[in-house]
Amino acid sequence: MNTKFPFLQEEMDRDPRCLSSRTVGTTARMANEYLHATEACRKDVGAMTTPFLTLHSHQDTSVDPESSEHLHAHAGARDKSVKWFDGMWHNLLLEPGKDEVLDEIVSWYSARAPPA
């Protein structure tokens, strides 16, 4: 639940396309699937060789920031970056500060894109 930006949580709760904790909740099966998927990703992360950019906030209470640190530290990719957006929460492209996030994404891709 987004307590940092309550107005965003209200928007997500009203959006029928969003899985809302108020309408569904986390079931035991869903938690188990998340656990298995996370374990598989952590086990196989060394095989990940595609360049990537990870964006995260240390204040994220939905996804543990340690997961981004682990991904960056253990992925097999030579070209990997992690960018922290502190003061934000989890929905980085929707929150105040999203322009800085978008600028980082564009900058990262532009530095790797072939010349036009």
Image (spheres, helix red, strand yellow):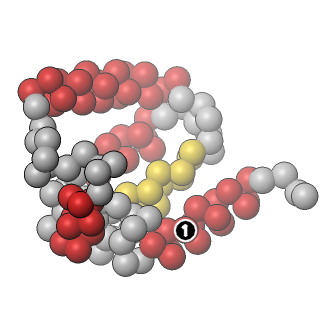
Q: Nearer the viewer, residue 18 or 92?
A: 18
The image position of residue 89, as x and y in percent, is 28, 65
Q: Is residue 22 above or below residue 29?
A: below
Q: Is residue 16 left or right of residue 71?
A: left
Query: Residue type at mark 1?
Result: Leu
Q: Nearer the viewer, residue 76 or 100?
A: 100
Q: Is residue 28 left or right of residue 111?
A: left
- Secondary structure of the residue carrying tag 1 is helix
The quadrant holding residue 50 is top right
Q: Is residue 96 above or below residue 93?
A: below
The residue at 10%/31% (across/down) is 27
The image position of residue 86, as x and y in percent, is 33, 71
Q: Is residue 5 above or below residue 108?
A: below
Total count of labels: 1
Position of the N terminus, as image quadrant, is bottom left
Q: Is residue 22 left or right of residue 67?
A: left
The quadrant holding residue 97 is bottom left
Mark 1 is surrounded, within 10 Å at the Cα level, by few (under 14), some (14 to 19) or many (20 or more) other residues, namely few
The residue at 22%/64% (across/down) is 9
Q: Disc 1 marks which residue?
A: 102
The image position of residue 40, as x and y in percent, is 34, 21
The residue at 55%/68% (across/down) is 102
Q: Is residue 70 visible?
A: yes
Q: Is residue 104 left or right of residue 26?
A: right
The residue at 73%/60% (across/down) is 111
The quadrant holding residue 91 is bottom left
Q: Is residue 4 visible?
A: no
Position of the C terminus, as image quadrant, is bottom right
